[in-house]
Image (cartoon, rainbow, N blue to C red):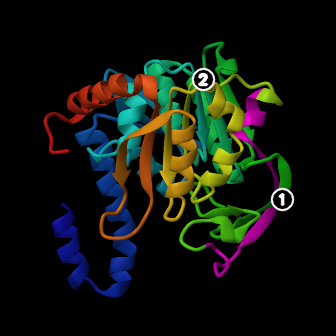
Amino acid sequence: MATIAHNLSRILPRTLRSWAQPKWHLLRELWELYVNQGGSIGRDLELSCWVINKPLGQKKVCVPARSFREFRRIVRFGTNPNDLVFHWINMIDDCDVLYDIGSANGHEALCAHGLHGCHTVFIEMFTPSIESILKGVVLATRGSSVSSNFDVVAAACDREDRYAKVHLHNPPVAGGTNNSFDNLDAYCRGGRQGEKIWVSQWSHSVSIDSLHQLHGLPKPTHIKMDIDGFEDRAIDGATATLKSRHVHSWIIEISPGREGAVHKAMEAAGYCDIAHFVHYEEIDDCEDHLFVRNDLAENYKKRLEEVRLKLYGDLPK
C-alpha cells in the first residue's frame, strides 16, 4: 500500500496531492487497526471524542483519540517488534503502582493498566494531553468503582517542587509534543532557545520523591519516563526513591548528552541496564533504556525474552 501511495504522490498535481494525502494516511491507519490488529474505532458522544478499541493479546483497551496524531500514536503502538516500551508494558505483571512521567495522551499507561490492573499515576504538564488522559480514565472506569486506581498529576517533573512557565513550541492541540518547562537550555539536542514559542502557561513541577513523600501518592513499583532531556533533573529529584529500591524497574528515554548522569545515578542505586532501543539508528537521537534492580536482573531478562517471543515470534534481535 505504501509503495502505491508513494508512486501516486509523484504524479498527482500538488493541489490534488494535498487533498488526498491526509485521507490516505487515515485510510492506512484504519487498515492497520481493523485488518492487521482486529481493533475498531467509534464515536463517544458523552466524551465528544473518538475511542479506539486497542487489542492487547486476549484483552482490549479503550483509549480516546482527539486528533489524528493521537489516533496514529495509539494504532502504531506495538507494531515495531523492537519497541522496548511495548515489551516492558506487557511483561510487568508484578506492577502494583506505575508512574508514567511525561504521559503525553496516556495511551501507554492505559495499556499497562488494562493488562495488569495496576494503580496508575500520570504526570504530564501539557494541558491538551491532560484532557485526553482524563477521558481515558473515564473510559477505563466507566461502569465500575475503581476510579481511585488512577491519579492524574497536571505538572512537570523536575528535581524540586516549584512554579514556572511551560512553553509550547507547537500549537496547543491534542497530540502535540515538544513543550518545555522553564529552562529552554535544559532540553535535548542542545536546548530549545531558538525554537518558536506559540504560547506559555504557568505550571507546577513535582519531584518523584515529593509525589509519595509529600503529596501522599502510593510508592511506585515501576516508572516510565519520557521527558525530552529533562530526565537527569527528574532523577536528581528521586534520591529517596532510588535509595529505597522499592522500584523494580525504570524505563527511561535518554536524550543525547544525558547518558552519563542517568547511568551513574542508576548504577549507584543498585540498578543495571538490561536492554535498550535506539529510536533512529541513522542519527544521534534518543534511546529507551530499561533499568532493573540488580537482584531482579536475570529474572527480568528471561521475562523480557519470553514476552518478545510471545508477541512477535522468533525475530532477529
Q: Position of residue 187 (x, y in %)?
A: 62, 65
Quarter of the view holding residue 273: top left
Q: In front: 115, or 193?
A: 193
Q: Position of residue 155 (x, y in %)?
A: 75, 46
Figure quadrant of the N terminus: bottom left
Quarter of the view holding residue 25: bottom left
In the rendered image, the residue lying farthest to the front is 268
Label 1 secondary element: strand
Q: Earlier in the sequence, mark 1 or mark 2?
A: 1
Q: In front: 261, or 39?
A: 261
Q: Amino acid at mark 2?
A: His
The residue segment tinted magenta is: 191-212
Which residue: 32% across, 56% down? 27
**In this orientation, does residue 171 appear?**
yes
**Which residue corresponds to mark 1?**
164
Horizontal arrangement in the rendering, residue 286 relative to residue 218 (left or right): left
Distance between the Cα atoms at labels 1 and 2? 30 Å
Q: Position of residue 272 (x, y in %)?
A: 44, 37
Image position of 260 with respect to 80: above or below: below
Horizontal arrangement in the rendering, residue 240 relative to residue 60 (left or right): right
Q: In front: 196, or 64?
A: 196
Q: Residues within 10 Å of mark 2 (few under 14, many from 20)?
A: some
